[in-house]
Image (cartoon, rainbow, N blue to C red):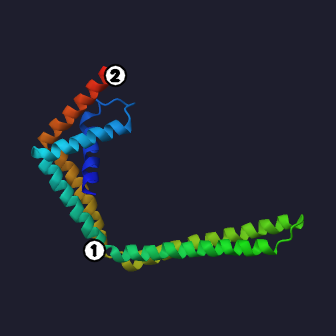
């Protein structure tokens, strides 16, 4: 989780500082490799490595807090999803039972259409039930602590991005990566 967060932030930084140096047709794999190299280099030495490490820890802790505060909401929503799955299963069973009653000749075509329609109605009811269940979950379990935790996690990501953008060492490293990418593109032409 921590490594992925840092790789994503490294990609975001490289896009922020080195957009002119990047070619539009460069593959995602190359960008990921550059981000991986940047991550490995930044974590080993320099002010930027310490900033990235601090950001990773701050984001991880805020996400942990949000998960703890919203655990009741998450478990309630899981229950809603399982209810919908069960309803969809019963809709399939309804259609199968209906088709078993249909005659095999020409009259069966209208019967099969009616069975499909019955299944569609059951699926629609299942979706409606899930929506109502989600609404009920939010009303019961979306506490102020949960809201605060979620916004805190978003705030931690935003603060980390600000800190990394302002960090001079990170700027230099990202610009160096941009130059390397540009050199690689120029040498490929």
The reply, left or right, for residue 87 in relation to residue 68 is right
How many numbered dots are placed on residues in this image? 2
Q: Secondary structure at mark 2?
A: helix
Residue 138, image quadrant? bottom left
Q: Residue at x 30, y 20 (%)?
A: 187
In the rendered image, the vertical position of residue 180 relative to residue 56, given as above or below: above
Judge by depth and name the residue closer to the eye, 138 or 96.
96
Q: Which residue reaches farthest bottom?
A: 140
Residue 129 appearing in the image: no
How would you rate the neighbour count of disc 1 (Cα within 10 Å): few for under 14, some for 14-19, many for 20 or more? Answer: some
Label 2 with label 1: CB-CB less than 8 Å: no
Q: Earlier in the sequence, mark 2 or mark 1?
A: 1
Residue 20, image quadrant? top left
Q: Which residue reaches farthest right?
A: 106
Judge by depth and name the residue closer to the eye, 25 or 43.
43
> Percent from the top left, x then y, of residue 120?
67, 67
> Percent from the top left, x then y, of residue 103?
86, 71
Mark number displayed over residue 98: none
Distance CA(mark 2)–CA(mark 1): 54 Å
Q: Residue at x 20, y 44 (%)?
A: 40
The reply, left or right, for residue 115 in relation to residue 37 is right
Q: Residue at x 36, y 77 (%)?
A: 72
Residue 107 appearing in the image: yes
Instruction: Give the quadrant of the N terminus.
Output: bottom left
> Percent from the top left, x then y, of residue 136?
45, 78
Q: Residue at x 27, y 30 (%)?
A: 181
> Percent from the top left, x then y, of residue 157?
25, 55
How would you rate the neighbour count of disc 2 (Cα within 10 Å): few for under 14, some for 14-19, many for 20 or more? Answer: few
Residue denoted by label 2? 188
Q: Nearer the viewer, mark 2 or mark 1?
A: 2
Instruction: Give the quadrant of the C terminus.
Output: top left
Residue denoted by label 1? 145
């Amino acid at each position: 989780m921590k490594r992925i967060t840092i790789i994503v932030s490294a990609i975001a930084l490289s896009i922020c500082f080195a957009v002119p140096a990047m070619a539009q047709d460069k593959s995602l794999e190359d960008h990921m490799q550059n981000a991986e190299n940047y991550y490995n280099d930044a974590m080993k030495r320099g002010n930027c490595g310490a900033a990235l490490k601090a950001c990773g820890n701050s984001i991880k802790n805020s996400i942990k807090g949000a998960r703890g505060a919203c655990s009741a909401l998450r478990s309630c929503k899981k229950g809603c999803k399982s209810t919908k799955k069960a309803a969809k299963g019963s809709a399939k069973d309804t259609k199968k039972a209906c088709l078993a009653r249909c005659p095999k000749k020409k009259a069966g075509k209208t019967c099969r259409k009616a069975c499909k329609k019955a299944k569609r109605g059951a699926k629609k009811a299942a979706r409606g039930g899930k929506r109502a269940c989600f609404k009920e979950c939010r009303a019961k379990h979306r506490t102020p602590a949960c809201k605060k935790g979620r916004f805190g996690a978003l705030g931690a990501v935003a603060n980390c991005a600000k800190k990394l953008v302002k960090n001079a060492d990170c700027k230099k490293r990202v610009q160096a990566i941009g130059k390397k990418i540009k050199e690689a593109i120029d040498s490929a032409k």
